[in-house]
Image (cartoon, rainbow, N blue to C red):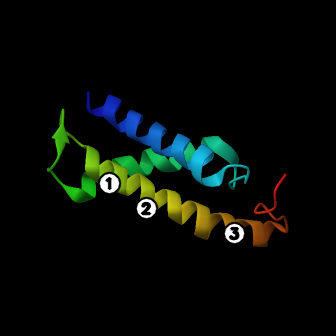
Amino acid sequence: MYWVWLIIVGVVISLLSNFVVLKSKKSFLGYWALLVVDLIGAWLGDIVFGNWALINDYNIVGGLIGAIVLDVIWKYVVSPWAAKSSGTDTSAKA
């Protein structure tokens, strides 16, 4: 059940960030890259924040925090940096 909760948290944060926060903007490498980043963030958040708010040995709150932090880093640090180095502007509306 640990992996099920980790995947649920990663997918929910990824969907929320793609369809609510970004709306029409495109992120660097698209939806799948952001999903992988959110899954890694959910896993790291569980490891870093320890054993509190556990559901089936998974730290839900820590996973949410980790996924959100890596999501913000990806969107506001990696995406603009990658756009500048590749010569394309990903912040423009399509």
Across and down, in percent, residue 93 comes to: 81, 56
Left or right: 12 as drawn, with respect to 23: left
* Residue type marked 3: Pro
* Badge 2 amino acid: Val
Residue under pointer 2: 69
From the viewer's perspective, is 47 left or right of 67? left
Compare marks 1 and 2 and give the one earlier in the sequence. 1
Q: Secondary structure at mark 1?
A: helix
- Judged from the image, the secondary structure of the residue bearing numbered disc 3 is helix
Residue pointed to by mark 1: 45
Provide the secondary structure element on which disc 2 rests.
helix
Q: Residue at x 64, y 53 (%)?
A: 22
Q: Position of residue 60 (x, y in %)?
A: 27, 44
Check the image and report above or below for 77 versus 29: below
Determine the residue positioned at 18% across, 32% down. 56
Residue 58 image offset from top left, x and y in percent: 23, 40
- Quarter-wise, where is residue 8 in the image? top left
Give the farthest residue toward the left.
51
Query: Is residue 86 depicted above or below 94 in this figure?
Result: below
The numbered dot on residue 80 is 3
Query: Which numbered disc, 3 or 2, marks the residue that appears first in the sequence?
Result: 2
